Structures are given as C-alpha cells and as structure tokens.
Image (cartoon, rainbow, N blue to C red):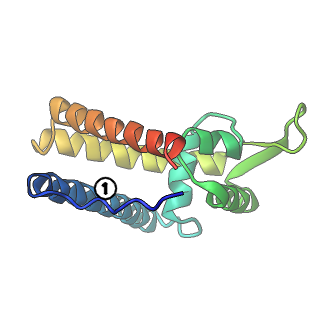
Amino acid sequence: MSIQEPLVPTLSDKGFMVGYLEALSLVERLHRLLLDVIKDEFERVNVLEINAVQALLLFNIGDNEVTAGELKSRGYYQGSNVSYNLKKLVEMGYMHHQRCEIDRRSVRVRLTEKGRYVRDVVAELFARHADGLENKGVLGHEGIADITTSLKRMERYWTDQIRYIY
C-alpha cells in the first residue's frame, strides 16, 4: 500500500478551488440558516417543544408511513440522528409507531394530528418564502432550476465518491 501525495491545486485550478470552497461554505451556512428560520417560525407560533431538525423531519415524512431506514436511504438523514429524533417525536405525540408485520425489527412511523400541524406550519413557511423569492425578484423559475440542477450534480458526484472511492 503506497501513500499518495496530497493534491495541491495548480495556479489554474486555484480559481475553481476558491469557488468550490465558497460553494461548500454557502451550503453549510444555508442549512444552518434554514434551521434558524424554522426555529423562529415555531417560536412565533408558540411551538417550543420540538427543534427545527425534528420539524423538518415531520415535513419530509408528510403523509407517508416510513421506517428510519427509508428516511436514511432517501438521503434525508444520517445514522443514529434519525432514530433518536423519531423516538423523541413518538414520545412527544407527534408520530405513531408500529412494528412491521413482516420484519419485526423494523418500525414504521406516521404523523399524528399534532405532527400534521407541524408539517403544515413548515409547508406554509416554505410557501411564503417561495412566493417572496419570486415576487421580490430574488429568484425566478430559471434561477431555481439552475441551482437545483447544480446541487443535484454535486450530490451525484459526492455520492459516487462515497460508493466507489476508498
């Protein structure tokens, strides 16, 4: 087994590298900012017992009945984080849980009425934001499409790196 030399960007690569690092920083900041925006909305509507990650989890589950494994495989959540949050949401009454008939190790979850209320609060928040972005000329259909296409390409590239390069 040989040790590879670290990749050092050439002068021509440095401009791309700077842009790539800026994009990574923006993705990270936007995720944290999204959680802050959700937290502020829940403070406004006086729902204080769940956190923004849990609210986003309820939104992403929506009307589906899922397992923790399905949420992880869809790429929404990582490892024990999703299991912990699902357990807390069941304990607080935001979700129902039931053992699968076929695989007794697996638990399926779905939203309760309380969970659907949280999902609806997040959905209304996102609808207001989408409307505001478009009506204030921040982003239009083409801008959102360009961002989404670029982020999907990056996601596909990173996924390939995890699956095929060790």
Identify the residue at image location x=22%, y=54%.
20
Residue 33 image position (x, y, % from top left): 33, 63
Give the residue pinned by disc 1: 27
Q: Along the horizontal axis of the image, is 116 left or right of 87?
A: left
Q: Quadrant of the N terminus?
A: bottom right
Q: Secondary structure at mark 1?
A: helix
The residue lying toward the viewer, choosing from 40 and 154, is: 154
Task: Assess disc 1: are there few (<14), some (14-19) or many (≥20) residues with their C-alpha within 10 Å of its C-alpha.
Answer: few
Q: Could you tell me which residue is drawn at 16 percent across and 30 percent down? A: 142
Q: Residue 155, relative to residue 1: is it above or below?
A: above
Answer yes or no: is residue 75 visible: no
Dividing the picture into quadrants, the one containing residue 5 is bottom left
Residue 153 located left or right of residue 66 = left
Rendered image quadrant of residue 84: bottom right
Q: Is residue 45 above or below residue 16?
A: below
Residue 19 position in % (x across, y down): 16, 55
- Please name whichever residue, 26 or 142, is drawn nearer the observer in this view of the structure: 26
How many numbered discs?
Answer: 1
User: Could you tell me residue 134's position as x and y percent?
Assistant: 17, 38
Kindly tell me whether residue 137 is visible in this rendering. Answer: yes
Q: Quadrant of residue 98?
A: top right
Residue visible at 73% across and 56% down in the picture: 90
Q: Is residue 65 left or right of residue 75?
A: right
The residue sitting at 45% across, 39% down in the picture is 160
Up-down: is 87 above or below 100?
below
**Which amino acid is tagged 1?**
Val
Residue toward you, 91 or 44? 91
